[in-house]
Image: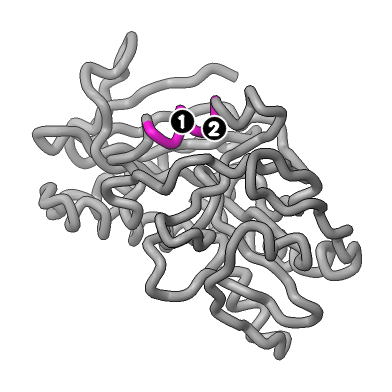
Amino acid sequence: MTARRLHWAGPGRWSEEVGPAPEAALVVDSFLAVGGRVRDLDRHGARFRAGCAALGLPTADLGAFLTDAAAALPRAGRWFPRVEAHPGGRLVLWVRPAPPEQWETRLWVAPEPDARRRPEVKGPDLALLAGLRGRAVAHGADDALLVGPDGVVREAAHSALLWWRGDRLCVPAPDLPVLPSVTAARLRGAAQAAGVPITPERCAPASLAEAEVWTVNALHGIRPVVGWRGAGAPVRAAVPDAARLDHFRSQLAADASTRR
């Protein structure tokens, strides 16, 4: 499978881009496509539109672009496409093969406070987040945990964060500056439907030693945190509840029914 970058030239029209992008994208959104099916495609599109609106980018053509992007996805295989809004209103679909699926993860606690400029928009801080993930890998982890200047956990560089205290599902407090996660929202809805109490929290990294911690995103779904790295990290990782993990993974899989 080969990656392709497609520049949208208007309804039903694409031109293939060769070589690297001439400039960094301002707003992006990524989602998993398997056999032509995408979970929560409408929600990803809504987040992309909201990001463009927040940065003052043109939004009139986004509906047609997203419709054409969905139609252009491969019907077979496992892909991780990305829609991009560039300076001047240029719109791009990057059709990428999906990386191997991960079933667990290890987090490195970044030593400096979260320095994102626009945490609520996916795009402006991509280079910063990629750098943090690279540093995490150098420390034997898969991703970086972002912590605010107040010492409160926010999210991972490339995933939302959820954690369990007993039978309660905990989420970052609503006033914390985090990216609106499509997958986390889906899981919160599944938890509410099952009658699971949901508790907003403000907590330090060390307190997560008492909790079963999940990172969640569109690419990997749910990954329990099985190891920690970095100063101030939890001293241990809780053993995941296998039955609970399987239940919520099955809820995500059951919802993967949006066809292009």
**Magenta segment main secondary structure:** helix
Q: For mark 1, does the 10 Å Cα neighbourhood hold few (<14), some (14 to 19), or many (20 or more) residues? A: some
As helix, strand or loop, the secondary structure at mark 1 comes to helix
Residue 27: percent from the left, percent from the top? 28, 43
Nearer to us in this view, 258 or 31 = 31
Is 249 left or right of 60, judged from the image as shown? right
Residue 164: percent from the left, percent from the top? 73, 71
Q: Residue shown at 68%/76% (left/top)?
A: 169
Which amino acid type is shown beneath numbered disc 2? Arg
Residue 160: tell me if it is visible. Answer: yes
> How many numbered tags mark residues here?
2
Nearer to us in this view, 230 or 246 = 230
Nearer to us in this view, 159 or 58 = 159
Which amino acid type is shown beneath numbered disc 1? Ala
Residue 249: tell me if it is visible. Answer: no
Is 37 left or right of 47, judged from the image as shown? right
Q: Residue under circle 2?
A: 133
Quadrant in which residue 17 is drawn: top left
Q: Is residue 102 magenta?
A: no
206 shown above or below 58: below
Q: Residue under circle 1?
A: 130
- Using the image, tell me which numbered label, if any, was put on residue 104: none
Quadrant in which residue 166 is drawn: bottom right
Q: For mark 2, does the 10 Å Cα neighbourhood hold few (<14), some (14 to 19), or many (20 or more) residues? A: many
Q: Residue shown at 33%/57% (left/top)?
A: 120
Q: Is residue 129 magenta?
A: yes
Read off the magenta span.
128-134
Query: Do residues under tags 2 and 1 come within 8 Å of each other at their CB atoms?
Result: yes
